[in-house]
Amino acid sequence: MMAESVVHLSQADDAVAACVDAAAWTLAEHDLIAALDATHRLAQRLAALELALVREVDGRGTARAQGASCTAVWLRERLRLTVPTARRLVDLAAALDNDHNGGVRQALADGNISAEQARVITDTVTTVHDTAGTAAADKAAGVLCAAIDPLSAPSGPGDQRSPGQRRHDALADLCRLGRVSKPLAGLPRPRGPAVSAAGEPSLAGPWSGRIGAAPSIERDACGSSR
C-alpha cells in the first residue's frame, strides 16, 4: 500500500494536469489573476516539500546506498538536474533543517516567500548565527520574513507585477535600505533570460566550473554538500 503522502501527491498531480489542459483564455480577468496567484503559492509550497524530501534522502544516505558519490550527484541523475542546481537543493535543504531557520522554513511552506528568497535569508541568518549567536539569528530570520510581507503588497491599482516579482522587489528593497547586509548573490530577477553584450541570450550561470570528465563534475557537485 502506498503511503498517504504519495497518494495525496498523486491526486495533486492529477488536479494540476487538469488545470494545465484547461484553456487559460476562457478565464475572466479576475479568475486569471487568482489562478496565477494560486499557482505561484502552490509552487512555493511544493518547493518546501521537495526540500524536506531532499533533506531526508540526504540524511538517510540514500544516494551512497544506491551507488552515487553524494546526494547532489544522485539528484542530478534522478531528477535530470544540472550539477549547480542539484548542489543548491542539497545545501538549501540542509540550511532549512537548522533550528534557527524554522521560521524561514515555515514561511516557504506557507507560500509567503520563494525558494530564492529562502536561500538569501538562510545565508544571512547563518552568517548572523556564526558571528552573533543563536538568539540573534532567530531574531534576524523573524525580522526578514516579517519585513518582506508588507513590502510585497501592490503599490497601487496600476501595479501589474506578479506576486513573485513583488516579493523579489521587496527583498531587494530591504537590501537597498540597509536592513540586510547580504547581497542578492545568486538571486535572479524573474523578468526574462540573461543577455550578452551583443544582445543575444546568454547561457551563463552561477557555476563557473569547467565541463569535463564525470569525476570532475562529481567533485564539483559534492564539494559543499553532505
Image (cartoon, rainbow, N blue to C red):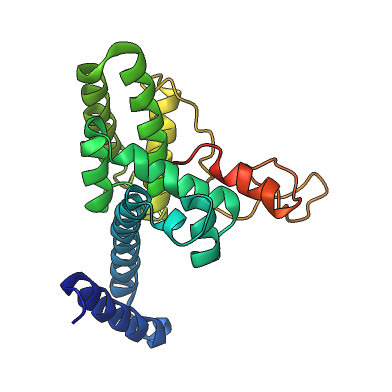
Instruction: Give coordinates of residue 220: x percent, y percent.
Output: 62, 42
Q: Nearer the viewer, residue 181 or 176?
A: 181
**Residue 125 to residue 98: above or below:** above
In the image, what residue occupies the spot 29% across and 74% down?
31
In the image, what residue occupies the spot 33% across and 56% down?
44
**Residue 175 to residue 154: above or below:** above
Instruction: Give coordinates of residue 144: x percent, y percent.
Output: 29, 30
Looking at the rendered image, the quarter that the C terminus falls into is: top left
**In the image as oriented, which residue stretches furthest toward the right?**
198
**In the image as oriented, which residue stretches furthest toward the top?**
132
Q: Is any part of residue 178 visible from this angle?
A: yes
Q: Is residue 182 rendered to the left or right of residue 35? A: right
Q: Nearer the viewer, residue 170 or 83?
A: 83
Looking at the rendered image, the quarter that the N terminus falls into is: bottom left
Q: Is residue 65 rendered to the left or right of residue 196? A: left
Instruction: Give coordinates of residue 57: x percent, y percent.
Output: 35, 55
Instruction: Give coordinates of residue 103: x percent, y percent.
Output: 21, 37
In the image, what residue occupies the spot 39% across and 52% down?
164
Q: Quadrant of residue 219?
A: top right
Q: Is residue 122 rendered to the left or right of residue 4? A: right
Q: How many marks?
A: 0
Q: Nearer the viewer, residue 77 or 20?
A: 77
